[in-house]
Amino acid sequence: MDARRGALVATVEVVLLVERIARSHASAVDTAGCLDLHPSSRNVVPGQVSMTVDLRHPEDGLVETMEAMLRQEIHARFDGRLTCSLTEIWRSPAAKFDGRCIDAVASGAAAAGYSSLRLHSGAGHDSAYIARVAPTSMIFIPCLDGLSHNEAESSTKEQCQAGVQTLLYAVLKLDNSL
């Protein structure tokens, strides 16, 4: 066992490190995925693993801080023991939504008799791109067991109607303010 240089074991350490870094920053989220093992066999220790890491935060500067922490920790843990390289393949700035639109959505929910919660979404929704050129906000509705972005995602007709009603009142609020 001492002679093994198991890339998958090191990858597990990196996955846990990525999660620890994200948890150390309020509002940060992480995803580690797309594992590709070489060789990939049930009884062979992989000598190479490729994976993706996605770090997100509402403030771009904190994403850079988390990336620097990840690079430093990986270098400190594996220097000399394993070869590890990090390559950035994509970067998207944090979406900045319009305060007036956000307020209109909260008012729309209240006018429709619903509660609302302000949250940051780091996902690559189309509104993240629209927000770069026009005032934008988003409305999320509840999903069964809180599961979203998954084929098992499910919302009731009533939950969808609540989202549409909130949108209507938000649009009317903005229209009346112009």
Image: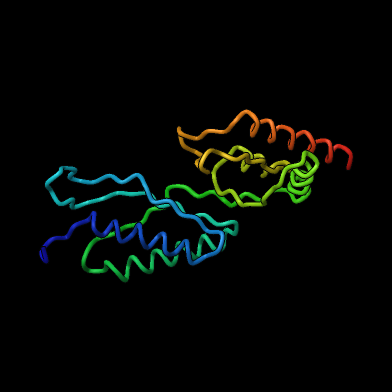
| Residue 70 higher or lower than 29, as above or below | below
| Quadrant in which the C terminus appears | top right
Question: With 130 as the anchor, is 23 left or right in this view?
Answer: left
Q: Nearer the viewer, residue 56 or 171?
A: 171
Depth check: give the residue in front, 123 or 142.
142
- Count every numbered label the image shows and give the total: 0
Quarter-wise, where is residue 139 in the image? top right
Q: Is residue 163 above or below residue 69?
A: above
Q: Residue at x 55, y 39 (%)?
A: 143
Q: Nearer the viewer, residue 65 or 34?
A: 34
Q: In this view of the protein, which residue sits in the foreground, 109 or 90?
A: 109
Q: Is residue 156 above or below residue 118?
A: above
Residue 59 quadrant: bottom right
Please give left or right for residue 50 compared with residue 41 in the image: right
Residue 76 place in picture, x, y as percent: 32, 71
Q: What residue sits 71% from the left and 32% below the top?
A: 164
Question: Which residue ends up furthest to the bottom in the rendered image?
Answer: 76
Which residue is painted at 67% across and 42% down in the image?
138
Q: Position of residue 18 (x, y in %)?
A: 40, 60
Q: Which residue is depicted at the point 60% across and 37% down?
A: 126
Provide residue 6's location: percent of width, then percent of height.
18, 57
